[in-house]
Image (cartoon, rainbow, N blue to C red):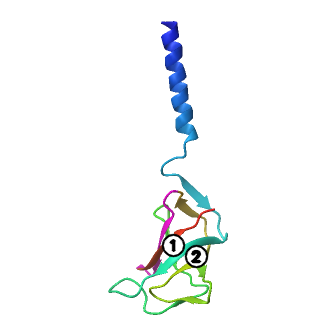
Amino acid sequence: MTRGWRHGAWVLGLLAFTASAAPAADEVRELPANTPLEAEFHLWPAQGKTGRDTPAWNNYRPQVHTGVGAEITCAMTFPGEKIEPGQTLRATLRCLDPLKVRVKQPQIKVTEGGRVVGDGRLLLP
């Protein structure tokens, strides 16, 4: 009986270690405010109640949603000085407040005044 108990305890210990050593499937990371974050960003062309008719210029300040926590206002800068509707570019974001993001799914939705104008994904380090 003692041998069976020890074996069972060893297996339970191994399972507990394996579970704690593996990264959580839905791990959330909080990124500090005012830290430059790289993102691949697509500005949608206007279609009904989504997208934009006009380009977004450097220092564009939309709200960014990650699906975790609150929407956060972020300043966006682009390699040129603007992004045209329909374009996808690498952008740099500087958020006014800490931004929570899912590590395995770093997608973002970008809105202005409640209107969805684009989407993308954060390029986490």
Which residue is denoted by mark 1 in the rendering? Answer: 64
Which residue is denoted by mark 2 in the rendering? Answer: 74
User: Along the polypeptide, which appears first: circle 2 or circle 1?
Assistant: 1
Q: Quadrant of residue 35?
A: bottom right
Q: Is residue 90 magenta?
A: no
- Identify the magenta region: 104-115
Q: Quadrant of residue 57?
A: bottom right
Tag 2 and tag 1, C-beta contact below 8 Å: yes
Q: Around disc 1, counting alpha carbons within 10 Å, would you say few (fewer than 14), some (14 to 19), or many (20 or more)? A: many
Looking at the figure, which quarter contains the C terminus? bottom right
Circle 1 — which element? strand
Query: Could you say which is closer to the camera, residue 25 or residue 50?
Result: 25
Query: Could you say which is closer to the camera, residue 124 or residue 63?
Result: 124
For image coordinates 52% across by 7% down, the residue present is 2
Most extreme residue toward the right, as rendered?
A: 35
Most extreme residue toward the left, as rendered?
A: 48
For image coordinates 60% across by 75% down, the residue present is 93
For image coordinates 58% across by 39% down, the residue present is 21
Residue 14 coordinates in the image, percent (x, y): 54, 28
Residue 91 coordinates in the image, percent (x, y): 59, 78
Tell me which amino acid carries mark 2.
Cys
Circle 2 — which element? strand
Residue 16 coordinates in the image, percent (x, y): 53, 31
Tell me which amino acid carries mark 1.
Val
Q: How many marks?
A: 2
Q: Is residue 12 positioned above or below 125 on the image?
A: above
Q: CA distance from mark 2 to mark 1?
A: 7 Å
Residue 97 coordinates in the image, percent (x, y): 61, 68
User: What label sits on residue 90 in the rendered view?
Assistant: none
